[in-house]
């Protein structure tokens, strides 16, 4: 097939599937339709607007999504069961909605999202933000491959293209022949600026950085401590990236030549992630950058895949740790704050990696030092995200507690030693009552 014929074929497909407006998606939404939406900037704002505006005509429609960035009336139960949200990870937007009972929350490990959605949905409609189609007729899912990329060729897709969405590479391409419709939109992506780094963050980061060898492959999240860790790795060499989240801090290390990925076992020389969230600088850097690949989360977060990388380093934040090493990372004082995400996925992958290390990080106190985040017991209702048998190292600004293979007495003693000094005496007394020391 010559180039002229191929170009005409792509143009014919483009015209036949291009929607006149976002409301054309309603032709694909029926009674009881399950709609799957990517997380964060993968949400097609104008398409979901159109669905919500027609909510009074819908019946039993459910929207499945992690980490919502845009507040909407339907999240607050305005349309009842005609249009209801099913969350898989709470955000600032959906957290109060869950507590008010207007949305549902499904516990999950991020790596298993595609399996859960496959089991819980019937003939789902995927609506997603994407880059503009290229000259070959391919869209890119941009900054959000996540669980949605696994449905390419396996579900109906209606796309919202946006010039602001970077064209990225990896297992996130969808051909125009594979969509039931697409529409253009024009709005900026949501930006999340790097969190301010405090002195305690730098102390934690230094403790981790000195334990990371050159040539290691990293998973690092978002927030002040992860930002500090990335900044502390500037003197390392040949680092690799295999992480669910690509953030601005990764850009700095790539530009400095610290991250090259040459020692990786999989996707050598590539920074692999499943979604990106940060500033416009990050999104611009990712656009048509072949050094980055976005893969489905069922691959990126699979502990069996992670374990194939030697010297894999996982760094995840938690909210509270008890004296035997159980980490509660998704609840605060027994109330749901987020969900499991990929923390357990990467902790397990690092555990099985040759020379791997799993770091769980937290500040030693909260509420201006009055409350210890290392506790004798987790609070009533707190949910264990990472099991004591999986946790490797816990890090506060006071040091590193080595837990893997340690006795309960050794665990409790080590964790007390990295608690804030003001709380160590009371923690020791509680540990004696529990028979730990």
Image (spheres, rainbow, N blue to C red):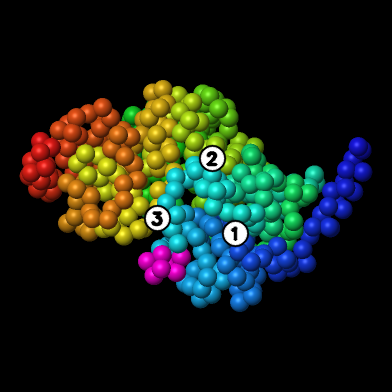
Residue tagged 3:
338
Q: Earlier in the sequence, mark 2 or mark 3?
A: 2
Q: Earlier in the sequence, mark 1 or mark 2?
A: 1
Q: Residue 338: x, y in percent? A: 39, 55
Residue tagged 1:
34
- Disc 1 or disc 3, which is closer to the eye? 1
- Disc 1 or disc 2, which is closer to the eye? 1
Q: Which residues are magenta?
A: 96-103
Element under label 3?
loop
**From mark 1 to mark 3, how far is it between C-alphas?**
22 Å
Residue count near mark 1 (Cα–Cα under 10 Å), binned few <14, some 14–19, many ≥20: many
**From mark 2 to mark 3, how far is it between C-alphas?**
20 Å
The residue drawn where x is 88% and y is 47% is: 9
> Can residue 409 be seen by looking at this rendering?
yes
- Quadrant location, the C terminus: top left
Q: Earlier in the sequence, mark 1 or mark 3?
A: 1
Q: Viewed as shown, does residue 401 lie left or right of 21?
A: left
Residue tagged 2:
298
Closer to us: 259 or 109: 109
Q: Are marks 1 and 3 in contact (CB under 8 Å)?
A: no
Task: Please tell me in which quadrant of the rendered image residue 268 appears.
Answer: top right
**From mark 1 to mark 2, how far is it between C-alphas?**
20 Å
Residue 102 colored magenta? yes
The residue drawn where x is 45% and y is 69% is: 102
> Can residue 216 be seen by looking at this rendering?
no
- Quadrant location, the N terminus: top right
């Amino acid at each position: 097939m010559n180039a002229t014929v191929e170009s005409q074929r792509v143009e014919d497909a483009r015209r036949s599937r291009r929607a006149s407006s976002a409301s054309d998606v309603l032709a694909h939404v029926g009674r009881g339709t399950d709609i799957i939406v990517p997380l964060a900037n993968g949400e097609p704002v104008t398409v979901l607007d159109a669905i919500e505006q027609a909510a009074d005509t819908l019946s039993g429609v459910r929207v499945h999504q992690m980490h919502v960035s845009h507040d909407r009336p339907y999240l607050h139960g305005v349309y009842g069961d005609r249009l209801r949200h099913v969350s898989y990870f709470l955000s600032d937007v959906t957290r109060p909605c869950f507590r008010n009972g207007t949305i549902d929350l499904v516990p999950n490990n991020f790596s298993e999202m595609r399996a859960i959605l496959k089991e819980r949905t019937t003939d789902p409609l995927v609506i997603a933000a994407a880059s503009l189609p290229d000259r070959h007729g391919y869209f890119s899912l941009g900054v959000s491959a996540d669980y949605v990329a696994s449905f390419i060729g396996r579900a109906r897709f209606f796309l919202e293209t946006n010039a602001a969405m970077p064209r990225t590479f990896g297992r996130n391409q969808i051909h125009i022949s594979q969509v039931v419709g697409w529409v253009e939109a024009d709005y900026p992506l949501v930006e999340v600026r790097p969190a301010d780094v405090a002195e305690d963050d730098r102390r934690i980061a230094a403790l981790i950085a000195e334990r990371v060898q050159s040539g290691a492959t990293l998973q690092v999240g978002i927030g002040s401590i992860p930002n500090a860790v990335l900044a502390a790795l500037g003197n390392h060499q040949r680092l690799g990236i295999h992480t669910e989240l690509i953030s601005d801090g990764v850009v700095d290390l790539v530009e400095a030549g610290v991250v090259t990925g040459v020692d990786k076992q999989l996707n050598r020389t590539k920074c692999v992630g499943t979604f990106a969230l940060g500033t416009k600088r990050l999104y611009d850097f990712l656009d048509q950058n072949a050094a980055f690949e976005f893969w489905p989360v069922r691959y990126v977060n699979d502990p069996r895949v992670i374990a194939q990388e030697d010297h894999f380093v996982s760094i995840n934040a938690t909210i509270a740790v008890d004296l035997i090493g159980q980490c509660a990372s998704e609840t605060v004082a027994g109330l749901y704050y987020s969900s499991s995400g990929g923390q357990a996925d990467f902790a397990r992958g690092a555990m099985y990696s040759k020379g791997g290390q799993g770091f769980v990080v937290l500040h030693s106190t909260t509420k201006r030092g009055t409350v210890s985040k290392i506790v004798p017991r987790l609070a009533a209702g707190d949910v264990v995200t990472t099991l004591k048998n999986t946790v490797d190292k816990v890090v506060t600004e006071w040091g590193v507690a080595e837990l893997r293979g340690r006795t309960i007495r050794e665990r409790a003693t080590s964790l007390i030693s990295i608690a804030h000094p003001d709380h160590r005496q009371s923690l020791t007394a509680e540990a004696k009552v529990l028979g730990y020391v």
